[in-house]
Image (tube, grey):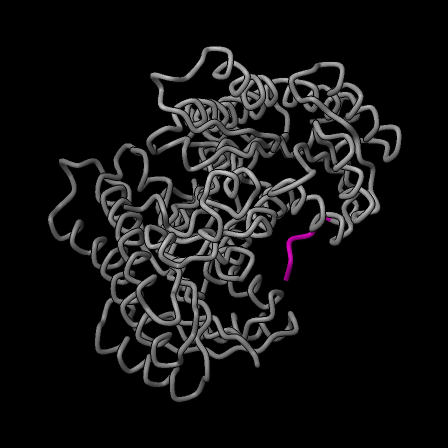
Amino acid sequence: MTFDVKDKVVLVTGAASGIGAATARLAAARGAKVIATDVDGERIQGVAADCQCIGLKHDVTSPEDWDNAIAAAVHHHGRLDALVSNAGIVNYEPIIDLDLARFRTLTQVHVEGSFLGVQKAVAQMRAQARGAPATGSIVLTASVMANCAAPGISAYAVAKAAMANMARAVGVELGRKGDMIRVNALCPGPTRTPLLEGAMPPGAMDDPAHWTDVPLGVPQEPEDMAESILFLISEESSFMTATQMVVDGGWSLT
Amino acid sequence: MTRSAIVTGATSGIGRATALRLVRAGFHIIATGRNPERGAETVRQVEAAGGSGEFHSFDVTSESDWAAFADAVTGRHTSVDALINSAGSFFTKALPDTSLEDFRELWTADVESVVLGTKYGFRMMRDTRSAGSIVNISSLAGLIGLEDCAAYCAAKAAVTHFSRVAALEGAQMNPKVRVNSLNPGVIYTEMITHAYGDNDAVKAFVMDGNALQRVGTAEDIASAATFLACSASRMVTGTAMLVDGGRGAD
């Protein structure tokens, strides 16, 4: 029934909460060997304890932290099969008020963080292949905001569009270079995460009136995103690369 | 309670492979097609895989056939949980050589079949109160162009966009029904070998356009169809899911 990820070594960033935590938990429950990382080095330990997996403090804008995270995967499990580049932040501000420093921070976490992750993960996947075509799956958590818009979210939309097209560009490049490393973007719609909850009035998340724009009529749960991410990690999606998988309850249809 | 999945075009290719993959997800298989012998072979393979199945022979372009099929299904089954509209057709011909009859024949086989299938799928799911999932097999050719395939590209673009609107209508049902299109790249099936032949040059064509340098198989599409059919994709509706080895990305 489920899409097999047993024994795959999976590195998940931004795993202390939200989609990352749900992905780490579901992957671990299905037998994957998870390395859960987060910039919050204390909270990640709680998730790691739940998953009985490695938990690491990891600032995705730091090349050294990436080296440490991948080294941990190799040290404990001998290899890296999948990267879920999921760490993200959000900023709700009209463009006219948006400070350049905040814009930079936001794009650094999403775009530079994913760039570093892709580069370091691919290097490891190639090294462990020992001359054979390298295999692996990389999932970048983008957003439906990569392809649509809402007021006050321009910096986030720019960053997520960059991530979605990074998956496309890198997916094509790696395939054409003879690797079997796949790169796909997940584009979630509004999901019950701390990022979104922090931006909503108290109680709005469970108020049906708030979800009339979503055809399926309810907020998405982080577990819904985790299911899609695990499908993209599994061998059953081995012919998928350079795509955007939209999971939004139909929100972007109208 | 056993969940059931209808698969049209289940006598070969993507349809048959999807039926066999859905067995592993626990679905009872209601296979349809035009050729009873090949349908019986699909049911035999379903049973050999440890599942249960039945075959209904009818013409997916006939509304009266769909109506009779829907009555038969809702009379026998308490839920209709998934419908994979896989039946379709393909030809390659330069536009100056494509007759209006050629175009209409393909439009009927690829578009009208899906419109009717979705309509009667909605009815079967409504009548059995099933929160079902409908998967319409479209094509990468519904999203980008392919030379000498204007009729097919137009038909598959229609299927892709029709599915988005159907998703909006399905979301108004109670319980809600999900609708997605699944857009394969060039997949090595009888549909391709029938049109282009079956030799190394065709295999190279099937493979070389992909970023991932391998041949796409019916099983690749069956896996994605199963993902869209089952609860793992509970919040996925109105999407065009591309499974093309990266062919359309460059």
Q: Report the magenta residues as a range.
A: A1-5
Q: Of all residues shown, which one is farthest toward the right?
A: A75
**Where is residue B184 shown, x and y percent of the image?**
43, 45
**Where is residue B130 shown, x and y percent of the image?**
43, 74
Do we see residue A191 in this rendering?
yes
Q: Of all residues shown, which one is farthest toward the top?
A: A100
Position of the N terminus of chain B, as image quadrant, is bottom right
Rendered view: A253 above or below B96: below
Q: Nearer the viewer, residue A23 or B99?
A: A23
Majority secondary structure of magenta residues: loop
Q: Residue at x 27, y 63 (%)?
A: B113
Left or right position of B11 against B101:
right
Position of the C terminus of chain B, as image quadrant, is top left
**Where is residue A62 shown, x and y percent of the image?**
69, 15
Q: Nearer the viewer, residue A3 or A227?
A: A227
Q: Of all residues shown, which one is farthest toward the left?
A: B100
> Is residue A162 magenta-colored?
no
Q: Residue at x 57, y 75 (%)?
A: B44
Rendered view: A97 above or below A160: above
Q: Nearer the viewer, residue A48 or B45?
A: A48
> Is residue A4 magenta-colored?
yes
Q: Nearer the viewer, residue B58 or B198?
A: B58
Which of the 4 image quadrants contains residue A46?
top right
Left or right position of A104 against B71:
right
What is the total number of numbered labels drawn onto the structure image?
Answer: 0
Left or right position of A171 against B59:
right
Do we see residue B38 in this rendering?
no
**Where is residue A119 shown, x and y percent of the image?**
65, 18
Q: Of all residues shown, which one is farthest toward the front?
A: A202
